Amino acid sequence: MKETIHSSQILVCGGTGCISSGCEEVKNALEDELNKNNLSEEIKLVQTGCHGFCEKGPIVITYPDGVFYCEIKPEDIEEIVTEHIKENNIVERLLYQDPISKEKIANYKEIDFYKKQQQIALINCGYIDPLEIDDYKKQDGYLGLKKALTELEPEEVVQEVKESGLRGRGGGGFPTGLKWQFARDAQGDKKYVICNADEGDPGAFMDRSLLESDPHRIIEGMVINAYAIGADEGYVYVRAEYPLAIERLQRAIEQANEEGVLGENIFGSNFSFELHIKAGAGAFVCGEETALMASIEGERGMPRPRPPFPAQKGLWGKPSNINNVETLANVPYIILEGAEAFNSIGTENSKGTKVFALTGKINNTGLVEVPMGISMQEIIYDIGGGISDGKEFKAVQIGGPSGGCLPEDKLELPIDYDSLIEAGAMMGSGGLVVMDEDTCMVDVASFFLDFTQSESCGKCTPCREGTRLMLKILNRITAGEGQAGDIERLERLSYNIKDTSLCGLGQTAPNPVLSTLKYFRDEYEAHIQQRKCPGGVCPELLGDFKIDAEACVGCTSCKDACPVEAIAGAKKEAHRIRSEVCIACENCVDECPVDAIFRE
């Protein structure tokens, strides 16, 4: 991070995660306390975008010392101002505590969650006010655009992006510079650039956070893109479920027009560019380029056959270039710092960094940006803090519903496009869901397939009918009604759907099933052949609840908690559960003080 804007600041994380946990009340309490102590002129209070560590919000950081306070409540503010701001005494009880060493850590740079991160796309997220263009400009904002317009020809901009090695961060990993070259070479009196912010993967919030936290960076990337390919108009296609992102982006567009970095004759050049926002209805299929363009045009979001590709015939039949939010967020850095600065990071075929939304059964959930080539082990254990509740790692789902589930022996796998595809997964847009020992992998496959099946546009038969048939088989297996040959049927359907579907949704929908079959086939076999769920998740395949007579102390806590009077036994005597009455609500398990209740 660059030097702070002011010598004295208090930053309050204002991303969606922290807003949901009460950051607005914290900010208001800070304003009141600073005014009360006559410090409002001396100290700048900044509500930023997402700082990344969503698990620990609301987050308050003081500058220039970088002290990181987490899980802050309004009633904590008086102590922070009185002790820290006025007396320079750190309030230790509000600091982050390492879950392993139990050490209290003051500076956020010393917290494991941040140590191994390397930020390019997220460089300003959590540090600047997303509603203030001046904050962005003080962090070298729009200098990349100025350099492109005043020092480089459009062909040189394309070449710089090519040499950087930047690949599309939306899932496909296609070389960005080559994509720009196709659009630049296309003949047409009108061209468009489009930002794909239709982020819909379960557990993914990378694009949303970038738009909420640093909207000017996305605008700058789009204008550079437009200059490079010869476009004069663009759209940000963002799902309507992201109202905060839309609000901050709209404000950023207004400011950019006022400052002259959007509109007519940008930076005194003969280049002009107009930018619009299109709020999508939240259909997952609209993440596919041609479906997205159909939606902008006012049509139902359904994929079109390719070729022609958007670079030749895109929005309203005109040459168009589409990149996702994270891809565009890297562009200003590449142009300002040069291709070599970017391609010096990462692996031979996967350059730069990648943003991940780290979720699931993990201690540190949040938004992280890491260099390509880092291992899954480092992300999950060094940054993510390991598996929550002391459980064992079982699998990680990478690439969203179109990705794959990887087992423990793949933890040392480097995170890059080629390695993941070889392992049966994919980079995707950056969702990373961690699963523990209590996870049923057949149930996981069913969950993700249910999502893609419901999101299918229905245009092509393989996706529409094939995913429905696969889901029917999976549901039968998890219900204890699996049949001999079901595994083979799933594999056959998977490959047929991948080979014959019209768009990427159908072509990748079977990936969770194929990856779980590849690495967790024994769980499918246990469900079908033994009528057992190894993860203890599928209700129809679980045994009855029992009470360990030797462990039971007869406290009656379980008996009192049972809503159907299924537990018998006198006080101070071993109890028993009447299976024929039990409804498996698990109230007794939650209330037992000696963990004497188990399921066969």
Image: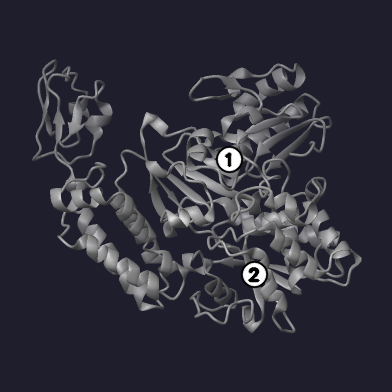
Q: In which quarter of the image is the C terminus?
A: top left
Of tags 1 and 2, the one toward the viewer is: 2
Locate residue 412 relative to residue 53 in the image: left or right. Answer: left
Which of the two labelled residues, at mark 1 and mark 2, occupies the earlier sequence position?
1
For the residue pair 494 and 45, the one nearer the viewer reads as 494
Locate residue 264 relative to residue 112 in the image: left or right. Answer: right
Residue 381 rendering spot, x and y as whole percentages? 48, 34
Amino acid under disc 2: Lys
Residue 35 rendering spot, x and y as whole percentages? 77, 29
Residue 508 rendering spot, x and y as whole percentages? 42, 64
Q: Is residue 102 above or below residue 396?
A: above
For the residue pair 212 and 100, the one nearer the viewer reads as 100
Q: What element carries label 2?
A: helix
Q: Quadrant of the N terminus?
A: top right
Locate residue 106 relative to residue 98 in the image: left or right. Answer: right
Report which residue position mark 2 lands on: 179
Q: Are marks 1 and 2 in contact (CB under 8 Å)?
A: no
Number of residues whose C-alpha sits closer than 10 Å to that of mark 1, classed few (under 14), some (14–19) or many (20 or more):
many
Report which residue position mark 1 lands on: 18
Task: Name the residue at the front extreme.
Answer: 348
